[in-house]
Image (cartoon, coloured by chain):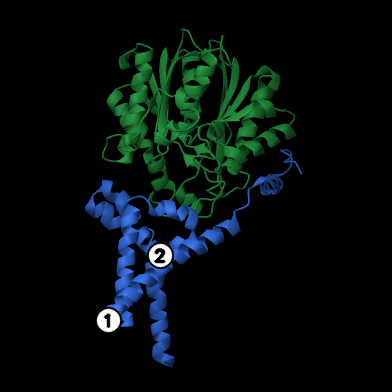
Chain colours: A blue, B green
Amino acid sequence: MPVDPNKPLEMQKKQYQEMVNRSKPKHPVLRNIFWAFVIGGIICTIGQGFLNYFMGLGLPALEAGTASAIVMVFFAALFTGLGIYDEITRYGGAGTIVPITGFANSMVAPAMEARSEGMVLGVGARLFTIAGPILTFGFTFAWLAAILYYIFG
Amino acid sequence: MFKNPPVIAATATIVGPKEGEGPLAQTFDKIVEDPYYAEKSWEKAERRMLEEVMQTALKKAALAPTSIDYLLAGDLLNQIISAGFTARSLGIPFIGLYGACATMYEGLALGAILIDGGFADYVLVGASSHYSTAERQYRFPTEQGVQRPPTAQWTVTGAGAALLARTGAGPVITHATIGKVLDLGQGDPSDFGSAMAPAAADTIVRHLQDTVRGPQDFDLFLTGDLGLYGKGLAEQLVRERGFDIGNKFADCGTMIYDHHRQDTHAGGSGCACAAVVTGGYLMQQMLTGKIKRVLGVATGALLSPLTTKQGETIPVIAHAVAIEMR
């Protein structure tokens, strides 16, 4: 259906939306899911490798988990700094955003960029621009869970 | 329509590394390999590019800044800082413009009006954008890992300037059509092409109706940054209103990159996109006589990240300028 400029605006918007939907390219969902699985899987396998290594050194499971998280965050930050992490994400999508490495990336990226506005008003103020909502809701739900645990636990 | 069509006496262009690897690399005056351009921040780099193209345009026309009556410039950054700071160092009476990615053509139209109206002999027009400054203002930090949808466009790093003169040799601006702000309800900030296509189509149709011309009168219809999908939509919209421009229709956004090789998805965007392709490729084609008459139509999306977060749709504009080689 053509967009008729003599019709009311709401009608034109509907007609145009139909036209856009016809021409709009589909997100390559299957390909994205596949690569998210592969790259996310590789990241998690590396993490598991560190976990096994630290447990092999005699660390208890909980501490070994913390240690491998630290190592993974370090490498994510390093690769962000080297400009590699965003290249990987282009293919890995959610596979690189969801693991803890994605969180590190979302802290380091704004920090690097805010450097030009100085340490306090730049890096200090912007460090949490992307990670902020994650922390806010993380804290909120941890707090809710704690209350539920206190009452029913 | 201009009674005394102003002349585009000189143009100057400068682009970043990615544009320098693109198919139009040969048409630009200068390619800068370093996105920081030896400055401390991307904002400063963008400013330096804009200032440099202004100077180059002046040099090509052998004029001093003092002989220019007005400087018309704009960019994408908040408070159009690239243009304002450039004007600070040039010392030319300055009119700051904001037309998003349509800024260059807004400037060409206004500059032509000033000269034709007898208010100026020389007007310098320019616009700039930078991938990294635009990305950090509109989207995500540049090193942030994000997956771009197929409709996303890549902001062109670069700057373009054009010097308009009352007399002289070169292509002339014969007509201008100022765009109306439209909004057909598109709200996806990663699909500007679909949002801007109706504005481009409306301006093209109004221009042809006002001037009683048809597609046969032009060698080329050149839009600013509709990208692959927006271009198709605009072509369709223009056809629905009775004009077939299909075989003469090009878009700066689809020309500046090789989107298969350079992973730029739907094409280029940004103020510099229309500015450098017009100042580089188009001027070259006109000066060598390959294109005689062109309708340049630059499109702009007049949104801010704030309006998107508040759930607003995207108002869009398109300005057209008819350029002719005489």
Element assignment for label 1: loop
Question: A44 and B246: which one is in front?
Answer: A44
Q: Earlier in the sequence, mark 2 or mark 1?
A: 1
Tally of marks: 2
B305 in relation to B198, above or below? below
Question: Which residue has dot 2 on it?
Answer: A133
Mark linked to residue A58: 1
**In the image, what residue type sits under mark 1?**
Gly
Q: Is disc 1 on the same chain as disc 2?
A: yes
Residue B90 pos. (x, y %): 30, 23
* Quarter assignment of residue A100: bottom left
Asked whether, in this view, residue B269 is left or right of residue B30, the answer is right
Is residue A77 visible to us here? yes
Residue B125 pos. (x, y %): 42, 23
Q: Please report, as a chain letter, where disc 1 is located.
A: A
Mark 2 surroundings: few (<14), some (14-19) or many (≥20) residues within 10 A: few
Of marks 2 and 1, the one in the foreground: 1
Question: A13 and B53: which one is in front?
Answer: B53
In the picture, the quarter occupied by the N terminus of chain B is: top right
**In the image, what residue type sits under mark 2?**
Pro
In the picture as drawn, the residue positioned furthest to the bottom comes out as A152
Residue B127 pos. (x, y %): 42, 29
**Mark 2 vs 1: CB contact within 8 A:** no
In the picture, the quarter occupied by the C terminus of chain B is: top right
Mark 1 surroundings: few (<14), some (14-19) or many (≥20) residues within 10 A: few
Residue located at (32% from left, 81% from top): A62
* Quarter assignment of residue A89: bottom left
